[in-house]
Amino acid sequence: MRRRRRTRVGTAAAGVSLLLLALTGCGMQIPADPHGSLERIQGGTLRAGATEQPPWVDVRDAGAPIGSEPELVERFAAHLDAQVRWSTGSEADLLTALERGELDMVVGGFLDDTPWTDRGAVTRPYTERSTKHGVQKHVMIVRMGENGLLTELETFLHEEARS
């Protein structure tokens, strides 16, 4: 009986390995973006939303937002050989646009305990600061399910923090 169980486990593991190898050979990328965001953005346009939250994001009447997060988004876009098309508005409006696929990511001084986790995928904290209320860990939000984009952004943010 033990021999039979080991054989089944070994056969299943081999099957999974072959499946992953086959999928990789077909050009499938893991992690994947069901809506193809990363592929569309590379060499194209990153659609970013920004909501007012100085000093992280400062929204001016005319022009692109400024602050540390818009600067990071611009560098991330350059990393992907893309241009940024900015939209500004309230958190609720921007997260609705993100859910509908009208935006790829949203910034606005979001913290890791953001209430918006049911509306978008949150990066790992990319920076933190101490305040009188404790340590605040900052995150960015991308479209739910776009795991390739999320992974690329997190890798970029990690590298930026190291330099």
Image: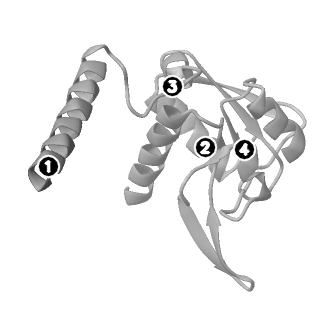
Disc 2 crowd, CA 10 A, few/some/many (<14, 14-19, 20+)? some
What amino acid is labelled 4 in the image?
Answer: Ile
Residue at 51% x, 36% y is 147
In three-dimensional space, the C-alpha distance between marks 2 and 3, rounded to whole angstroms, equals 19 Å
Residue at which label 1 appears:
6
Q: What percent of the width, then of the height, locates residue 58?
A: 79, 49
Residue at which label 2 appears:
71
Q: For numbered disc 1, what is the local secondary structure?
A: helix
Residue at 74% x, 83% y is 133
Label 4 with label 2: CB-CB less than 8 Å: yes
Farthest residue in the bottom direction?
132
Residue at which label 3 appears:
38
Closest to the camera, between mark 2 and mark 1, is 1
Q: Of marks 2 and 3, which one's residue comes earlier in the chain?
A: 3
What amino acid is labelled 3 in the image?
Answer: Leu
Q: Is residue 90 visible?
A: no
